Image (cartoon, rainbow, N blue to C red):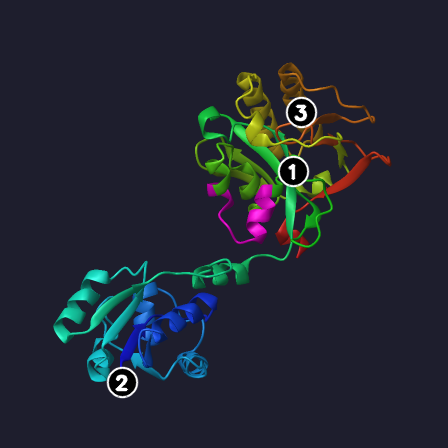
Amino acid sequence: MKKVFVSGVFDIIHGGHIEFFNQAKKLGDHLTVCIPTEEVLFMHKRRRAFIPLDHKLHVVRALDMVDEVVVGGDLEMGLNFVTEFIKAKPQVLAVTEDDQYGNAKRALCKKTGAEYVRLNKTLSYNKISTTEIFDRLHAPAEAPVRVDLAGGWLDVPRFARPGAYIVNCSVSPMVSLYHWPYETCAGLGGSGAHALLMARDGVASELAMNVGWQDPVVIKETGLCVWRSGKRPVLDIKVNPMFLHGKMAIYWTGKPHTTKDLADTDRDYDLLAKGSVIGREAVINSDVDMLAEAINITHEVQLKEGMEHLPSYGEKAKKYSGGGHGGYAVYLFDERPYSAKLLGIEPYMKEFME
């Protein structure tokens, strides 16, 4: 009988683990799976087990391709299974292609006469890791979107300026993976909201597209926020935005836009920075009139950039949200009027809404 031995945390059993066990079993006649004690798991991962050890053992033992399950308690990093491995005397030690302790395991195989076999991670569907599953469990079911009010583009690292800011606010209606009440490619930070709902690093994905980080950070933080212009997000001020309740709306221009396609357009960054400083003071003082001034300065930059004039609805201020040249525009009022052309939005801050 040819024995095959595998080890791993296997903290939340998923399709990748099943495929690994199936591939390993094909290398021989008898498959032994070694699972670490919770102490060893903590030493390796610096966290508690997601599933108690006795439950994990019960699940793995129930798998048809598994013949035996043992518990590894050795404390050497990557070799917590050595005692059980020597006891089992397998002919094959199977590992995944991304195993971090290959050298130590090869040395163990050489010492014991076992064959060391690396198995590719092959699935006919999307791969997922235990960490990704854990992140999905903690991802929200819904998320706000955002409107930027002043300092837009100053979150793009190559356009960042010392002493300048980005002023933005998370807003409802909320979105979910199954309900998205807005147009797409619309300047409301939809990619940042989607990243949060999918438990992904929104900042990394936005920066990878050579655009700014403001969307994912304010959507995750919520509230009315001021961020320092720079290469990475630094929160300067966050306030309860409820003084804006009943005062905001968005207008759909009728055409989508993609921010990354507009990033390198010529624009007046000095004027953007000026508006951002005024916007910061407005947030500090909860001053609607000063915030309107900051918004209108930003819109002045947008008009100089060549964006079309927006229709008037008796507003205090208006501007294109996001990159502009399409998408939504945000309007600020003393009191939001009714209009079939406007969609009312409300400031959102989770500490006050939950």
Q: Pointers 2 and 1 in contact (CB under 8 A)?
A: no
> Disc 3 to disc 2, how far (Cα)?
70 Å
Task: Tell me the amino acid under the disc marked 3.
Answer: His
Task: Tell which residue pokes out farthest to the top in this image.
Answer: 304
Residue linked to disc 1: 188
Quadrant in the picture for residue 85: bottom left
Image spot of residue 53 (x, y percent): 40, 79
| Label 2, residues with CA under 10 Å away: few <14, some 14-19, many ≥20 | few
Give the main secondary structure of the magenta stretch. Answer: helix
Residue appearing at x 44%, y 65% in the figure: 16
N-terminal of the two: label 2 or label 1? 2
Q: Which residue is mark 2?
A: 1
Q: Is residue 64 visible?
A: yes
Number of marks present in the image shown: 3
Query: How far, Cα to Cα, is label 2 from label 1?
Result: 62 Å
The kind of secondary structure element at disc 3 is loop
Left or right, 234 with reference to 114: right
How many other residues sit within 10 Å of disc 3, few (<14), some (14-19) or many (≥20)? many
Q: Residue at x 21, y 84 (%)?
A: 87
User: Magenta region: which residues?
Assistant: 191-204
